[in-house]
Image (tube, coloured by chain):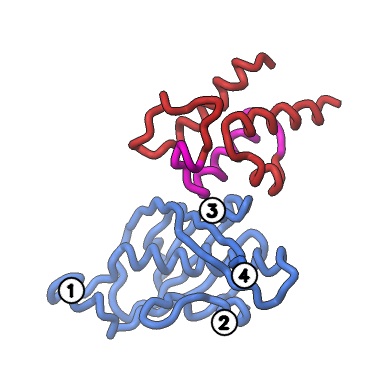
Chain colours: A blue, B red
Amino acid sequence: MNDILEKLPYNKPFLFVDQLFKVNDNEVEGIYTFDTESDFYKGHFKNNPVTPGVILTECCAQIGVVCLGIHLMDKESTSESAELQIGLSSSEMEFLVPVLPGETVKVVSKKVYFRFHKLKCEVKMYNSTQQLVCKGTIAGMINPVQHV
Amino acid sequence: MDENIKYEKLRNIIKLYLPEDVSVDYIDIKSHLINDLNINSANLVDIVLDVEDEFDIMLENDDMDTMQTVEDALQIIDSKIANKNS
């Protein structure tokens, strides 16, 4: 699972995965703690920092779709260091509970399908009291980079 | 299955994934799915999955590469149905 984290194509301030607990061909679970110093809290909202829904969606996508996608591509490809080209293709989310700076969230994602390089997942995010924070469906395209 | 029925069924699937600025009237037997109808690769996968359900067939990665136009798609559907029944 550490291999997957190393292969993630993100860096601070846009990496929203701390640790994975579980990865198999059908599901993934991981956590992330929102950094109280993140820039977006200065403006979302004025004097009332709340994690933006787009960032929660991004966190769900990074853990739920990209980490699972890396795992599935690893099994498919023969070369170890295959670079991946990743893109979000659709997301439909519902937000139920606000997430404040410094909170740790858990993302649970289940594969709907992975076919022709498109991975579609049902994702759920929980806070530390196991409340459902947001849920939805996210899909992305994951292709090996073609080196000519 | 009648060829016209097959074409109608395919057209009804493609229709769901057209970008907003592409009218259904643009769909023609010769239409290139990506270049003419502006369908992106993610939606192309959805079209293939819907085609599989509609015609009860299974497509492979190679078929995806061959499936460039509406006509290509119909040919692939034909050959898959033929294989299934043979």
Name the residue at 33% across, 36% down.
Answer: B21
Label located before the other in sequence (2 or 3): 2
Q: Which residues are magenta?
A: B34-58
Name the residue at 59% across, 67% down.
Answer: A145
Q: Which residue is mark 3?
A: A120
Asked if residue B43 is among those painted magenta in the image, a careful observer would answer: yes
The answer as to whether the residues below labels 2 and 3 share one chain is: yes
Q: Residue furthest right?
A: B86
Q: Are marks 4 and 2 in contact (CB under 8 Å)?
A: no
Three-letter code, disc 4: His
Label located before the other in sequence (1 or 2): 2
Q: Quadrant of the C terminus of chain B?
A: top right
Q: Are marks 4 and 3 in contact (CB under 8 Å)?
A: no
Q: Which residue is mark 4?
A: A147
Disc 1: host chain: A
Q: Are marks 1 and 2 in contact (CB under 8 Å)?
A: no
Asked if residue A85 is among those painted magenta in the image, a careful observer would answer: no
Label located before the other in sequence (1 or 4): 1
Label 1 to label 2: alpha-carbon separation: 31 Å
